[in-house]
Image: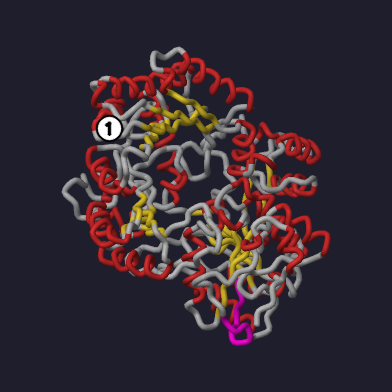
Amino acid sequence: MRKLALNDEILLSIEKPARYIGGEVNSVMKDKEKVDIRFAMCFPDVYEIGMSHLGIQILYDMFNKREDVWCERVYSPWVDLDRIMREKQIPLFALESQDPVKDFDFLGITLQYEMCYTNILQVLELSQIPLMSSMRDESCPIVIGGGPCAYNPEPLADFFDLFYIGEGETVYDELLDLYKSCKKAGQTRSQFLYKASQIPGIYVPSLYQVEYKEDGTIRSFTPIREGVPSVVQKQVEMNMTDATYPEAPVVPFIKVTQDRVVLEIQRGCIRGCRFCQAGMLYRPTRERDLKVLKEHAYRMLKNTGHEEISLSSLSSSDYSDLQGIVNFLIDEFRAQNINISLPSLRIDAFSLDVMGKVQDVRKSSLTFAPEAGSQRLRNVINKGLTEDVILDGADKAFHGGWNKVKLYFMLGLPTETEEDRKAIAHLANDIAVKYYEIPKDQRNGKCQITVSTSFFVPKPFTPFQWASMHHPGDYLGFAKTVNHEIKEMLNQKSIRYNWHQADVTVLEGIFARGDRKISKVILEAYRMGALYDAWTEYWNYDRWLQAFENCGIDMDFYTTRQRSLDEILPWDFIDIGVTKEFLKKEWERAHQEEVTPNCRMKCSGCGVARYKGGVCVEKRKQVSGNCEENQNES
């Protein structure tokens, strides 16, 4: 019988003990004596967040299909248990076996957002694993990072043994097989890491050296051993239809952030928004076949008992058979009262028709993401939305019975002016006008428009990766301009305004584009008490300011400085398929306020046609030109 790592006294003294006991429906139990590799899969945030992450569900299912591997889950302990574990020297444990993480072969940590970086150090320290990879010996697990933040792994390079660059369905089996053979042959940790570095998509930071110029920029980034590749290639799963997918995901005991079945209908995005990292990282756009999606939906709902299913995609409206999957879900599960969630839809007649079928329009709100208030700035960011399209979509929605609209914008975008910021208020007001043009007896109550602004963060592998940022006070000034202008609008009482924390944005920007020198700041802030920085109640900007000062590192070097196009960037050694030449061209087009057509309208030669699949080879009438020809021209 399994013994819990925490005794009853501890469990009764902490918030939500179900976070730590495991044993959930569909969790995988194996005999640890009969497997060759034990893998602890970690999401460095609280259980409710981590249990909602699809990527971990996919890898958990994929690893556990192997008879020789047992993959278990681990999450960051909440602050109450963190304190107890430190006081009583209880090592962090995996949920399934309740065994200490330090006894595993691998600790895999997913890097989903920058503000979880101190939680990574928490996981390592509570696991009693040395924080610095250089201090680990043969008794320690191999610490591996993956996920979107791994595309600039340098701020975390000192803490990880290796990084997996790309989609997990591709070379993980090769990596695990290599570890198994090295272990059997009695080879050392360093021997395994050297051989792992030669697997496509695997980056071992200790096998590279960085040299800096006097101005702090990178002079060179090179391997230190023969056979280690100078460029790490992103790994892409091109056959989404046949790729592994969890048909019996773990069902939590407690309510989590996304307490539902998640059906990934496609990966990637055709739109090419210049601020969007995911849109570049996950190119090319690849769809799952409708027949397979139907089978996944049926089995997942049956195996979990969930009462809601969500379609996952960066842009669901662009899935070629959205109507087919939605109609199937409605027809098949209407009698079972299964709710259908459709995020990431454009607000057009087709999408509104689809949403009208699955939502109670009197209770739900519609979400628009114009991102910028003026047409000029929407052209700069390549949003591909005109004001006429936005207002027409709002008009159709209001006539369809909706009266609540959420609008999402960014402030601090490249080339942004005060007029662009004021235009946010004017666009919100114009949308409200559309509602009040409907005769009073035909309206559905009072119009509610919620305007939310976040502050723009330049991300690696986007056309805006060279852009400068602002100081927190500047960002708050931008928000003040929007707030003041909204109060001047005729329909101000129908408009509510929220804005993001400015100081968090600055730190996120530093982590996103930082180099190896940032690792010592992260370590210093953690030692000063930084933890759960993504949570408002534990965020302390002054602590981070002190950490930068203690380490002698200038924050402005990473934020307000605009990079030159010929500068070596910390992530330049990674090849994501999208070429740097294409990103430079898009940076220039942004400043010329030129719109680049989406991938189905016209290939722009971004580079990912090399993968010979997905949208790049679709035989559609609306495709203008040939991707390979356009790629050669670029």
Measuring from the top left, give residue 546's x and y in whole percent. Answer: 78, 36
Tell whether position 35 is magenta: yes
Classify residue 383 as left or right of residue 517. Answer: left
Measuring from the top left, give residue 62's x and y in whole percent. Answer: 47, 72
Tell whether position 326 is magenta: no
Classify residue 73 as left or right of residue 327. Answer: right
Classify residue 13 as left or right of residue 41. Answer: right
Residue extending furthest toward the front: 441
Placement of 520 over or under 456, stated as above or below: below
Foreground of the two, 488 or 197 = 488
Placement of 486 over or under 362, stated as above or below: above
Measuring from the top left, give residue 392's x and y in whole percent. Answer: 25, 29
How many discs appear? 1
Question: Mark 1 Cα within 10 Å, few/some/many (few <14, many 20+)?
Answer: many
Q: Quadrant of the N terminus?
A: bottom right
State the extent of the magenta-drawn residues as a range: 30-39
Foreground of the two, 567 or 404 = 404
Q: Which residue is found at the position 64% from the left and 74% from the top?
A: 192
Residue extending furthest toward the left: 621
* Residue on which the image places disc 1: 393
The amino acid type, in three-letter code, at marker 1 is: Gly
Q: Which residue is found at the position 32% from the left and 45% from the top?
A: 359
Q: Quadrant of the C terminus?
A: top left
Task: Name the secondary structure under disc 1.
Answer: helix
Residue 295 visible (yes or no): yes
Residue 158 visible (yes or no): no
Q: Which residue is found at the position 64% from the left and 39% from the top?
A: 536
Q: Which residue is found at the position 52% from the left and 41% from the top?
A: 459
Measuring from the top left, give residue 509's x and y in whole percent. Answer: 59, 38
Foreground of the two, 297 or 67 = 297
